[in-house]
Image (tube, grey):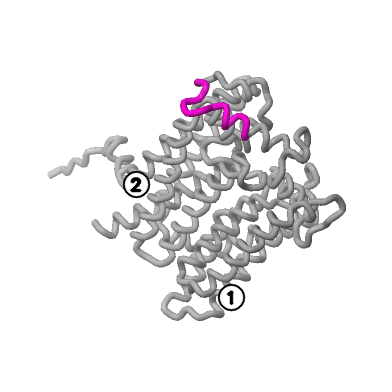
Amino acid sequence: MAVVFEKPSLWQRVSPMLRGFDGPLAFAVFMLAGAGLLAMYSSGYDHGTRFVDHGRNMLIAGFIMFVVAQVPPHRLMELAVPLYTLGVALLIAVLIFGITKKGARRWINLGVVIQPSEILKIAMPLMLAWWFNRREGQLRALDFLAAGVILAVPVGLIMKQPDLGTALLVLAAGLSVIFFAGLSWKLVIPPVLLAVAGIVAIVWFEPRLCAEGVDWPILHGYQQQRVCTLLDPTRDPLGKGFHILQGMIAIGSGGMWGKGFMQGTQTHLEFIPERTTDFIFAAFSEEFGMAGNLMLIAGFVFLVLRGLFIAAEAPTLFSRLLAAGVTTIFFTYAFVNMGMVSGILPVVGVPLPFISYGGTAMVTIGLGLGILMSVSRARRGLQN
């Protein structure tokens, strides 16, 4: 008796891969991606092929997300040490024979010009999650000290380039993993209080600290200028303070409901610098107003809360710490970009996820979302 096997249809083969996707997270991604396409079309339609390239970058990020989502977290854990080692080795190579642009040495030519610091945005939470997973059940103070060294090496190398924005993102991702691994509040509160005291001191003594010829320790000259410009952008309104002032004008001119799609005067008369990259939030604010901003912020808040929920429900310590670290990257991206455009944080060159133009950042976003989808998929598989 012959046995006939029916060949499964394409949908029957693909549906199991789609079924594991986290619906609420996918909804947030689609909403933010839609807002990004609207903002990019308005601010970049006359800026070469920015809109088309932005759409292509989103498709690439979506494909990366889909592929990474199929990889179980325990397989991702196997990549932690090799990826971290590769990233640190490339950062050292950049310092030795990297490519310098606009006074910063951040790139290296390996047949294709790449920025190795971008690797660490994902490699850092991977590495620290792997480290704490190995030490599960026997954590000591020395384990947290070792984690601090693992974090400090790449952050120091990135700041040496210098690239304060990327260093801040890597630092935030790493510190979040260390915190969620069980770091005592007794060790968290003192540096937070010290940082607050430092900020108060800088604001209080701003006239003296920002006087000509005064050099600050640790920070590079241009970084010192960014902080001083933040405190008083009118100090140099046509120079270093121009970005902040024009961003604030655009945000304020949008009012409650905005000037309307494609109607932003600050944007289309090119008063907003970097209107398709770092300062695209100002262009979005001008055209969609406070109402649009609140909806955009709500989208990011929902994305972050969903990421934290996925982390809290993760089946293993590794996946829990990894999801928390990746979620912190999205929070830091959005908070720092909106803060610097609004004039409450220094300008450090951090893009706004889904909204700002940039292929490398979009790839990082796709990787991060794929990891969150993978962790959520593993949780659902365990429940089933």
Segment colored magenta: 248-260
Name the residue beneath numbered marker 1: 145
Name above or below for residue 334 compared with residue 189. above
> Residue flagged by tag 1: what amino acid is it?
Leu
- Residues marked 2 and 1 touching at CB (< 8 Å): no
Nearest the eye: 72 or 52: 52
Left or right, 342 with reference to 233 = left
How packed is label 2: few (under 14 Cα within 10 Å), some, or many (20 or more)?
some
The residue located at (50%, 20%) in the rendering is 260
Which residue is situated farthest in the left direction here? 1
Check if residue 251 falls in the magenta segment: yes
The image shows residue 254 at horizontal and vertical percentages of 54, 27
Helix, strand or loop at mark 2: loop
Helix, strand or loop at mark 1: helix
Name above or below for residue 296 compared with residue 160. above
Name the residue beneath numbered marker 2: 22
> Residue flagged by tag 2: what amino acid is it?
Asp
| Quarter of the image where the N terminus is located | top left
